[in-house]
């Protein structure tokens, strides 16, 4: 048995390799990117011919993983929390079809929004779809839970979510591997000819089955290796802790020499019998969970509300991440006032890299739009930093692909010029269909695709549209003469301003492709040489 120092994300990846996956499907998104990246670089992954290239978006990733499961093989699909919104159609319906080969959905949530638009909690999706959710507390448990989740998935014939959060995904710990890897499944396509055909008559029966097996899923939770009881000498208060909040809870218990009982729960549906016994044994219950008060809400419905403390009554903070101090304070510990850290270095906001092509795009665009009204719809990527000084160039960033469709809606309302800025990877993720809508409606807008040949914001992963952006735009109907290519460099500023001005004035759909390789990936390539 070998022991490795792994990030939580890497523990997921190594666990999946050792559990016998035949493919991993994902679109890069912090804090989940390292899962797929680890498998891509793994010698074991290469030897096992594990499929590991990036998908165009989370929906295509999920559906491809479901197809691999249909064929009888084990598939891992991973994404960040907002990525599950993109994959939600396939995810929710896959709970009704069920799976064949084991299918594990690893979703990385981002409490405190370190690199995300919101704090949404994936456990809500698990409850919504009525599938099991595993929530490990540390890297070793995370590695082990991948095996457990694949075995559970194949036993109950449902996808299983493994939920991690930023702190667990991006912290390191020693992980002991199994002695022998699980062999990949043999090809064995689904034999039930109707199971995956969600016509209403079939879907109703499949949905009835999903509802009827919920008591069995709760029984699995009662026996889950992710749950355990730590008994204490005091019954005044007990803590029910989920996921990484368990670590904070145990640190409080040790640091302040407290003797309260702790019930660690790591699986949904909640094990009601286990929780009921814990409620009976303690006068008050603190619910410690990272994210939304998902399980607190459930337990307030199941049990005596007067006993429960947590996020809903502000005993714990309603937003952001938990920590040792917040749990200690909730348990009545008087904390010493913290000493302010002296400001040695001034805080510096994030900024585009020196030499980044996005800077030259914004400079040219601002020179044109300063003459008129500046309303620029942008998207999610490095270029979102164009909202900050010194550019102050963009007006929106809502979700992947929304730049195109928001510009279209504004154009339909009469706004001129209607300008959208999107990256090459985001364009192929979610922008193409919006541009097709604009072409079909002949909505006057200009889409600037700031094409740096990579998915730069998450570390330089391959972009699905590299070398094909112009062809894609032409293929969905943008007129050839209004697909303009520019190179965003200082020497080309005058020409780029001229082209932008012409296209902003055009009463139709136009696309400006600003192509220049990401400065960081260019540096990496030179180092490799």
Image: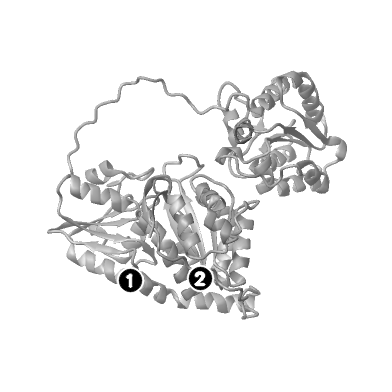
Question: Residue at the location (79% across, 41% down)?
Answer: 470
Give SS at disc 2. Answer: loop
Question: Residue at the location (33% across, 72% down)?
Answer: 223
Residue tagged 1: 222
Q: Is residue 526 left or right of residue 292?
A: right
Where residue 318 sits: x, y (%)?
36, 45
Whether residue 331 can be seen here: no
Where residue 512 sits: x, y (%)?
77, 34
Whether residue 33 can be seen here: yes
Q: Residues within 10 Å of mark 2 (few under 14, many from 20)?
A: many
Number of residue marks:
2
Quadrant hosting residue 459: top right
Q: Is residue 469 left or right of residue 330?
A: right
In the foreground, 39 or 61: 39
In the foreground, 42 or 421: 42
Q: Tell which residue pokes out farthest to the left in this image.
A: 233
Question: Residue at the location (40% across, 76% down)?
Answer: 215
In the foreground, 214 or 410: 214
Answer whether labels 2 and 1 touch (C-beta < 8 Å): no
Question: Residue at the location (60% across, 40% down)?
Answer: 460
Q: Is residue 318 above or below residue 69?
A: above
Residue tagged 2: 158
Q: In the rendered image, which quarter contains the N terminus?
A: bottom left
Q: Earlier in the sequence, mark 2 or mark 1?
A: 2
Q: Residues within 10 Å of mark 1 (few under 14, many from 20)?
A: many
Give SS at disc 1. Answer: helix
Quadrant hosting residue 388: top right
Q: Is residue 495 left or right of residue 374?
A: right
Q: In the rendered image, which quarter contains the C terminus?
A: top right
Is the image coloured rainbow, by chain, by secondary structure, or in one colour?
one colour
Where residue 487 sits: x, y (%)?
75, 28
């Amino acid at each position: 048995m070998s022991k490795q120092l792994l990030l939580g994300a890497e523990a997921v990846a190594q666990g999946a390799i050792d559990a016998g996956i035949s493919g991993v499907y994902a679109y890069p998104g912090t804090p989940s990117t390292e899962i797929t990246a680890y498998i891509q670089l793994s010698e074991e992954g290469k030897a096992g011919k594990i499929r590991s290239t990036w998908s165009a978006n989370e929906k295509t990733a999920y559906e491809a993983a479901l197809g691999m499961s249909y064929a009888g093989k084990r598939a891992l699909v991973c994404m960040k929390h907002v990525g599950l919104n993109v994959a939600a159609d396939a995810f929710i319906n896959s709970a009704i079809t069920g799976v064949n080969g084991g299918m594990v959905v690893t979703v990385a949530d981002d409490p405190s929004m370190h690199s995300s638009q919101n704090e949404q909690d994936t456990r809500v999706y698990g409850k919504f779809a009525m599938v099991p959710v595993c929530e490990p507390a540390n890297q070793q448990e995370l590695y082990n839970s991948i095996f457990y989740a694949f075995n559970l998935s194949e036993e109950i014939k449902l996808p299983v979510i493994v939920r991690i959060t930023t702190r667990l995904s991006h912290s390191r710990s020693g992980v002991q591997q199994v002695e022998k890897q699980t062999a990949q499944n043999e090809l064995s396509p689904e034999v039930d000819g109707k199971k995956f055909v969600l016509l209403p008559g079939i879907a109703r029966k499949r949905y009835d089955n999903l509802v009827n097996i919920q008591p069995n899923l709760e029984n699995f939770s009662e026996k889950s290796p992710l749950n355990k009881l730590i008994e204490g000498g005091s019954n005044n208060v007990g803590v029910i802790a989920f996921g990484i909040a368990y670590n904070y809870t145990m640190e409080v218990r040790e640091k302040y020499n407290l003797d309260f009982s702790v019930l660690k729960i790591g699986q949904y549906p909640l094990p009601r019998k286990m929780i009921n016994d814990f409620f009976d044994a303690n006068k008050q219950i603190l619910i410690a969970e990272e994210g939304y008060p998902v399980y607190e809400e459930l337990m307030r419905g199941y049990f005596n509300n007067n006993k429960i403390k947590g996020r809903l009554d502000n005993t714990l903070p309603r937003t952001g991440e938990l920590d040792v101090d917040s749990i200690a304070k909730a348990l009545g510990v008087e904390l010493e006032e913290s000493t302010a850290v002296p400001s040695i270095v001034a805080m510096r906001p994030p900024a585009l890299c020196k030499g980044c092509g996005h800077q030259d795009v914004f400079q040219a665009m601002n020179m044109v739009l300063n003459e008129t009204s500046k309303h620029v719809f942008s998207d999610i990527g490095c270029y979102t930093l164009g909202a900050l000084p010194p550019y102050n160039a963009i007006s929106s960033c809502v979700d992947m692909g929304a730049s195109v469709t928001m510009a279209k809606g504004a154009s339909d309302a009469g706004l001129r010029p209607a300008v959208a800025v999107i990256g090459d990877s985001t364009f192929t993720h979610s922008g193409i269909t919006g541009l097709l809508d604009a072409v079909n409606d002949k909505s006057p807008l200009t889409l600037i695709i700031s094409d740096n040949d990579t998915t730069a914001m998450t570390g330089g992963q391959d972009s699905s549209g590299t070398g094909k952006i112009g062809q894609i735009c032409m293929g969905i109907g943008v007129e050839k003469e209004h697909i303009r290519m520019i190179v965003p460099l200082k020497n080309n500023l005058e020409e780029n301003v001229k082209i932008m001005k012409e296209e902003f004035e055009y009463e139709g759909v136009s696309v400006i492709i600003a192509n220049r390789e990401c400065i960081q990936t260019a540096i990496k390539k030179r180092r490799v040489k």
